Amino acid sequence: MTEPLDPSKDPDRFDPLGLTVPDPEASGPGGSPEPVVLRGDETLIELLGEGAQADPRDNLLWLWGLVGILSFLALVSLLIQLR
């Protein structure tokens, strides 16, 4: 019979406070990445690092997408009611 997994038995991955993430840029002894301590107020772009793209939202395209989703939901609800 198997027993439940205990993450504390894996010292390379266990972080009791959940405050660190591996930094792919840095490498410590043995080539393993050193953890980066998170402040807690990082934006998504800061978490993703260099090369992350954050273009401004195109409001007209966003509106058409919203209209498309609402139309799809209305069509599905109509088909369910007429069935």
Image (cartoon, helix red, strand yellow):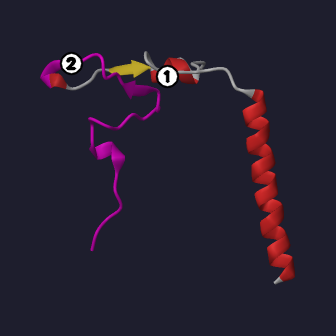
User: Which of the two discs, 1 and 2, labels the residue nearer the N terminus?
Assistant: 2
User: Measuring 52% from the left and 21% from the top, which residue is drawn there?
Assistant: 53
x, y (%) of residue 56? Answer: 67, 20
Task: Name the residue carrying label 1.
Answer: 47
73 left or right, relative to 8: right
Q: Which residues are magenta?
A: 1-30
Q: Amino acid at mark 1?
A: Leu
Report the residue that reaches farthest toward the bottom.
83
Question: Could you say whether the residue bearing mark 1 is in a helix, strand or loop?
Answer: helix
Question: Could you say whether the residue bearing mark 2 is in a helix, strand or loop?
Answer: loop
The answer to which of 57 and 25 lies nearer the viewer is: 57
Q: Residues within 10 Å of mark 1 (few under 14, many from 20)?
A: few
The answer to which of 6 and 25 lies nearer the viewer is: 25
Q: Is residue 21 in the magenta section? A: yes
**Residue 61 in which image quadrant:** top right
x, y (%) of residue 22? Answer: 35, 26
Q: Residues within 10 Å of mark 2 (few under 14, many from 20)?
A: few
Up the image or down, 31 lies above or below 76; here it is above
x, y (%) of residue 2? Answer: 28, 69
Task: Name the residue carrying label 2.
Answer: 28
